[in-house]
Image (cartoon, helix red, strand yellow):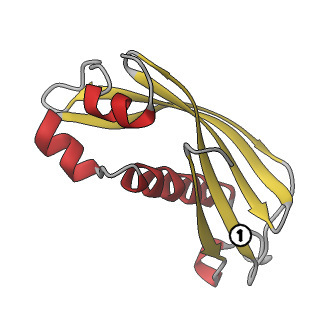
Amino acid sequence: MNDHSHQVRVRIYHEDTDAGGVVYHANYLRYMERARTEWLEATGFDHDRVEREWGVLFVVRAIDVAFLRPARLGDTLQAVAELGEVRHGLMIFRQRVLRQEQVLVRAKVTVVCVHAADFTLAPVPEVLLHVLGVKG
């Protein structure tokens, strides 16, 4: 992991699985969302503050995901969000869901910044770029 990454622990319960005890594919997206949300909070921001102070939201525009191996009932996983690229109004995350060191799911998630009032594209707030060490 780099300075712009975050990891969250996820325990697999019955509610996460299908009848065979295998994690339902859409749940991996939830785990990756948790990792991105915790990443944002670890930078000193959270979604409420970003909307309240700068009037913007972060929304997923695209996900390129590869399901490599299944997780099962009772597993403990790590969902990782690693910021790969920041441009004017978007952030690209490299994400993984692992069981110990084994990669189960890999994804590239493109998140765009939009004005909360009308969902038109907006620049990533300068203060967040500064914290990330990125030039705006």
Dot 1: few (<14), some (14–19), or many (≥20) neighbours within 10 Å? Answer: many
Q: Quadrant of the C terminus?
A: top left
Q: Position of residue 119 (x, y in %)?
A: 24, 26
Task: Please report the residue visible at 58 percent of the width from the left and 45 percent of the height from the top.
Answer: 3
Q: Is residue 62 visible?
A: yes
Type of amino acid under label 1: Leu
**Observer-nearest of 16 and 55:** 55
Q: How far across and down, in percent of the image, does residue 113 sit? A: 33, 28
The answer to whether residue 76 is left or right of residue 37 is right
Classify 8 as above or below 130.
Answer: below
Q: Is residue 97 left or right of residue 89?
A: right
The quarter of the picture where residue 20 lies is bottom right
Element class at badge 1: strand
Residue drawn at (15%, 34%) of the image: 55
The residue sitting at 69% across, 49% down in the picture is 1
Q: Is residue 123 above or below residue 130?
A: above
Q: Which residue is mark 1?
A: 77
> Toward the viewer: 21 or 83?
83
Near-viewer residue (42 or 28) = 42
Q: Position of residue 128 (x, y in %)?
A: 33, 35
Q: Quadrant of residue 12?
A: bottom right
Is any part of residue 18 visible from this angle? no
Horizontal arrangement in the rendering, residue 34 relative to residue 130 (left or right): right
In this rendering, is residue 123 above or below 13?
Answer: above
34, above or below 67, in the image:
below
- Residue 47 coordinates in the image, percent (x, y): 28, 49
